[in-house]
Image (cartoon, grey):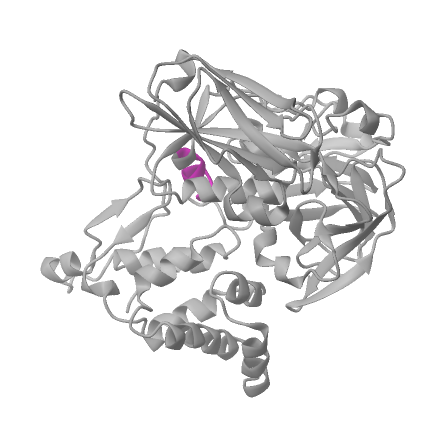
């Protein structure tokens, strides 16, 4: 399915190729990119930094020099976590129909990927598992989104079946998309109905799927905006699952871990990565095989055990989408040194789903601090005194949880001004309504009223931000808005403008 998303933030090969796929007559040319080894542990702070655009990155990639894209052997697509895109159970392997050319995209900025497909055909992304059917040469940009922003749209027993994506392409050329799903369809007695949730103009539409297989759900493209697969089943869904282990950094005489249980769904995995990154503690990801050897069944209970015995909280929990979203992890604490053997057990059958051993070498905190690369800012006017500059600059930046939260002086004490909100409104793109609902808590009814009273799009965005400011009067300062909008789904220009304001480089 989409277990490649487990190493989405640190896949080295993404930075080498540019996602360009050559026509058939040129496909024998060797790629210019070279592989590189990965470290034993992944710092959640480093993952956050690597998603930041480097100097000049984030601008249109058409200005870059084109290089040969990387083609991937479908039989050798295992990523750095040891998990391939194929289902983990033998039952599902028997009903696969993978016969597409597998291509590696280019990572452009803040989690977005890009493919340049040179000719008509059907291509599978080696990172996300998405399958694109195109009729001619086309460029496709896309990224995985969080279901938590769109879950309220699902009614009548519809459930998430796989990750939701934002795809940017010419819909007259992109004929169909096949979305990876995490379900096992080997149970012939379970009735399964697939559809696609299409969020169009901030309104949810449930559109029929064109076909489905043991790993993908096919959708004929109508238009492009946030879209993802959903399902109705007559029995509790059975998912291919993954287990992710994170170690707390900085402890001397003890060892603390978070062990996450999730379906093999890129959106859920992204939510886990964001939750760890925003924790008030710093964690590193342990490189352990994540794939569950048995299916995760919704409504069943699972427990984590350890050898030697450690302090594990909770003792067990029921696997449902709601529970996983709220707190889908075990906290594990040891006072003795490693090794530690962890096992995930299904409570009813007492059968193990997953086991891993954490050894002494896994627990070495070898995090290397990496400075964030920022584009060169315009020089401030020499008429501004050094004293004025010091009053506008942040005192210090706290990155202990992997997310840069800047504590400032009087710049952020007051609520945002009209001028600041207008600067942000001008930088918001077509996703502004999704940002309003998902990040700022503005309701659909409030957005409809704003659109009915204002014709100008920029003013609509300003009124939306003003609605947020009025609701949080007295606490609607710059730092709070930066905290709310510091998410991958928010346009780069908006976040860059907020950081400029925090640095004092973008006027009040």
Please identify the quarter of the rendering in which residue 262 is found.
Answer: top right
Which residue: 62% across, 62% down?
A: 152
In the foreground, 24 or 167: 167
Please identify the quarter of the rendering in which residue 268 is found.
Answer: top right
In the foreground, 495 or 464: 464
Residue 225 visible somewhere in the drawing: yes
Q: Quadrant of the N terminus?
A: top right
Q: Compared to 457, does 81 lie above or below?
A: above
In the foreground, 54 or 145: 145
Q: Compared to 321, does 346 lie above or below?
A: above
Give the residues drawn in magenta, as a range: 46-52
> Residue 232: horizontal and vertical position, in percent?
79, 51
Q: Quadrant of the C terminus?
A: bottom left
> Residue 464: horizontal and vertical position, in percent?
48, 74
**Left/right of residue 87 with respect to residue 213 in the rendered view:** left
Which residue: 35% across, 70% down?
A: 420
Q: Compared to 166, does 318 lie above or below?
A: above
Please identify the quarter of the rendering in which residue 74 is found.
Answer: top right
> Residue 248: horizontal and vertical position, in percent?
37, 30
Which residue: 52% across, 23% down?
A: 305
Residue 16 visible somewhere in the drawing: no
Look at the magenta stretch and give its main secondary structure: helix
In the foreground, 104 or 326: 326
**Left/right of residue 189 with respect to residue 404 in the rendered view:** right
Which residue is most to the bottom?
A: 453
Which residue is most to the front?
A: 348
Marks counted in the figure total 0
Indicate yes or no whether the magenta region holds residue 198.
Answer: no
Which residue: 80% across, 45% down?
A: 235
**Left/right of residue 172 with respect to residue 169 in the rendered view:** right
């Amino acid at each position: 399915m989409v277990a490649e998303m487990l190493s989405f933030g640190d896949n080295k090969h993404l930075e080498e190729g540019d996602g360009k796929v050559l026509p058939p007559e040129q496909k024998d040319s060797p790629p210019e990119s070279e592989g590189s080894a990965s470290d034993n542990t992944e710092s959640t702070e480093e993952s956050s930094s690597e998603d930041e655009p480097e100097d000049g990155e984030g601008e249109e990639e058409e200005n870059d020099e084109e290089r040969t894209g990387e083609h991937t052997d479908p039989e050798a697509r295992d990523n750095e976590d040891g998990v391939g895109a194929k289902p983990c159970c033998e039952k599902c392997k028997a009903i696969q129909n993978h016969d597409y050319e597998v291509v590696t995209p280019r990572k452009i900025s803040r989690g977005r990927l890009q493919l340049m497909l040179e000719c008509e055909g059907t291509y599978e992304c080696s990172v996300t598992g998405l399958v694109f059917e195109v009729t001619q040469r086309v460029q496709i940009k896309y990224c995985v989104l969080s279901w938590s922003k769109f879950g309220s749209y699902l009614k009548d027993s519809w459930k998430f079946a796989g990750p939701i994506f934002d795809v940017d392409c010419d819909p007259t050329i992109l004929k169909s998309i096949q979305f990876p799903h995490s379900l096992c369809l080997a149970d012939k007695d379970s009735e399964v109905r697939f559809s696609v949730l299409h969020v169009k103009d901030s309104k949810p539409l449930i559109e029929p799927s064109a076909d489905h297989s043991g790993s993908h759900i096919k959708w004929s493209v109508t238009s492009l905006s946030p879209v993802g697969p959903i399902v109705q089943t007559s029995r509790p869904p059975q998912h291919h699952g993954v287990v992710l282990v994170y170690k707390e950094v900085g402890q001397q005489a003890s060892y603390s871990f978070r062990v996450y249980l999730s379906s093999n769904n890129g959106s859920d995995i992204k939510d886990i990565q964001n939750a760890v990154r925003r924790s008030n503690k710093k964690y590193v990801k342990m490189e352990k095989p994540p794939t569950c050897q048995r299916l995760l069944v919704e409504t069943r209970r699972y427990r984590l055990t350890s050898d030697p015995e450690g302090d594990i909280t909770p003792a067990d929990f029921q696997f449902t989408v709601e529970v996983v979203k709220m707190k889908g992890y075990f906290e594990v604490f040891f006072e003795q040194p490693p090794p530690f053997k962890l096992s995930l057990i299904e409570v009813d059958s007492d059968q193990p789903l997953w086991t891993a051993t954490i050894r002494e070498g896994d627990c070495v905190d070898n995090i290397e601090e990496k400075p964030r690369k920022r584009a060169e800012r315009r020089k401030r006017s020499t008429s501004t005194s050094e004293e004025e500059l010091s009053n506008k600059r942040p005192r210090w930046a706290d990155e202990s949880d992997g997310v840069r939260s800047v504590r400032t002086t009087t710049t952020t004490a007051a609520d945002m001004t009209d001028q600041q909100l207008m600067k942000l409104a001008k930088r918001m793109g077509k996703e502004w309504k999704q940002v309003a609902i998902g990040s700022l808590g503005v309701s659909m009814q409030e957005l409809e009223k704003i659109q009915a009273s204002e014709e100008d799009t920029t003013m609509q965005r300003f009124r939306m931000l003003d609605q947020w400011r009025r609701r949080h009067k007295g606490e609607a300062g710059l730092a709070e808005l930066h905290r709310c909008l510091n998410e991958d789904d928010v346009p780069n220009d908006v976040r860059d403008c907020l950081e400029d304001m925090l640095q004092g480089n973008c006027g009040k």
